[in-house]
Amino acid sequence: MRVTLPDGREAVADYRDAIVVRMHAVYRARALEADPDPGDVAALTAWLERNMEQSARCARGECDHAA
């Protein structure tokens, strides 16, 4: 799943990654033309900062997570 953060960076995660729950929440809010929950955005930002390479691999279709 892909979500663009407010700062323009894109977070990409495999469906098996726990952060996808937060990504779905942000996506749903935006689909309803609402502001995403700040806690979801903060969690995604923190996750991306810790997992930049993993996100890049997922963006390239090279995710290697354990199920």
Image (cartoon, helix red, strand yellow):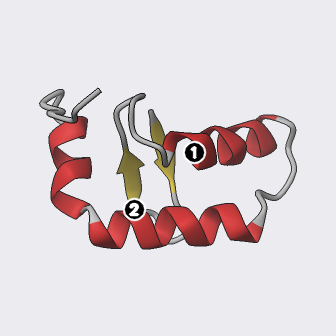
Q: In the rendered image, which residue does mark 2 sit on?
A: 9
Residue drawn at x 51%, y 61% as measured from the top left: 44
Q: Say which amino acid is labelled 2.
A: Arg
In the rendered view, tell whether residue 5 sits above or below residue 62.
Answer: below
Amino acid found under the numbered disc labelled 1:
Met
Q: Quadrant of residue 60?
A: top left
Q: Is residue 18 left or right of residue 27?
A: left
Residue 33 spot, x, y in % from top left: 85, 44
The answer to whether marks 2 and 1 mark residues whose Cβ atoms lie closer than 8 Å is no
Please give the label number shown on residue 23: 1
Quarter-of-image position of residue 9: bottom left
Query: Which of the two residues, 42 or 9, is positioned nearer the viewer here?
Result: 42
Mark sitting earlier along the chain (2/1): 2
Task: Name the residue rendered at 44%, 39% in the picture.
Answer: 2
Using the image as rendered, state which of residue 14 and residue 30 is in the foreground: 14
Q: Is residue 44 above or below residue 31?
A: below
Q: For this view, does 18 lie left or right of residue 49?
A: right
Do we see residue 57 in this rendering? Answer: yes
